[in-house]
Amino acid sequence: MGDVTLLLEAAQRGEHLAVDRLYSLLYRDLRAAARRQLRKRDHERSLDTTMIVNESYLRLRNRKQLKPGCRSQFLAYAASAMRSVIVDLARERLADKRGGGRDIVALTTNIGDSVAADDAELIKVHEALDELASIEPRLARIVELRYFVGLSEEESAQALGIARRTAQRDWEKARVFLFEALKST
């Protein structure tokens, strides 16, 4: 049995030190997942992958019901936490852009507008994914695994305990739902 497997078993028993060690062992994978999320949103210039991974670690460590059964499930938990961090930062930036209790400074470039547009789009995707999760939770999980973590169909199917073909169908259904949800906003 590998270190990750033993640590996953310890995390299932509620041992917080196991989560610490998992983060340490999978740190490169987590940074890569954070980098993928940021690259998709062109936020690399304004967000730090290390900060996102560290903040997601704090959020994940405080979860009472962290019960990952395999490496890909743990990465899915971490990706969900990273998504939450990125969305919270986007909301904060949008609030700041609208005043946020601070002095307003006029920009002479379009950079501020493009960051706000990216943040607004990110929040729309997040809300659409939350809506999907309320209707079909497994479809939302497949999106997190495939899109946010970057897992393959096979890895996603394994993490969810479903057949690969089911994972493929779920991915297609989720993409259609999200496309329609984002088109209507």
Image: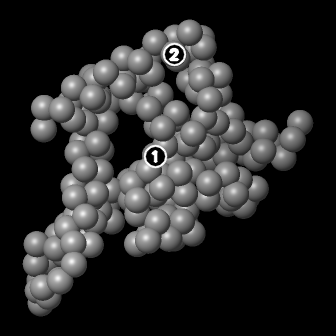
Q: Label 2 sits on what residue type?
A: Gln
Q: Secondary structure at mark 1?
A: helix
Give neighbour class at mark 1: few <14, some 14-19, many 20+ (Cα, 10 Å). Answer: some
Which numbered disc, 1 or 2, marks the residue closer to the eye? 2
* Up-down relation of residue 72 to residue 85 (above or below): above
Residue that label 2 marks: 168
Q: Position of residue 108 (x, y in %)?
A: 17, 83
**Which colour scheme appears in the figure?**
one colour
Q: Position of residue 128 (x, y in %)?
A: 25, 36
The reply, left or right, for residue 3 in relation to residue 113 is: right
Query: Image point 44% across, 32% down: which residue?
Result: 143
Residue that label 1 marks: 80
Q: Secondary structure at mark 2?
A: helix
The reply, left or right, for residue 73 in relation to residue 126 is: right
Q: Label 1 sits on what residue type?
A: Ser
Q: Earlier in the sequence, mark 1 or mark 2?
A: 1
Q: Quadrant of the C terminus?
A: top left
Residue 58 seen in the current view: no
Mark 1–mark 2 Cα distance, whole angstroms, equals 20 Å
Residue 155 seen in the current view: yes
Q: Position of residue 19 (x, y in %)?
A: 65, 54
* Up-down relation of residue 166 to residue 83 (above or below): above
Query: Image point 48% across, 55% down: which residue?
Result: 39
Query: Image point 27% across, 59% down: which residue?
Result: 119
Quarter occupied by residue 133: top left
> Residue 149 or 121: which is nearer the viewer?
121
> Residue 36 or 161: which is nearer the viewer?
36
As drawn, the label of residue 5 is none
The reply, left or right, for residue 127 in relation to residue 169 is: left
Q: Position of residue 25 (x, y in %)?
A: 76, 56
Check contact, mark 1 vs mark 2: CB within 8 A.
no
Instruction: Spot the residue most to the right.
Output: 1
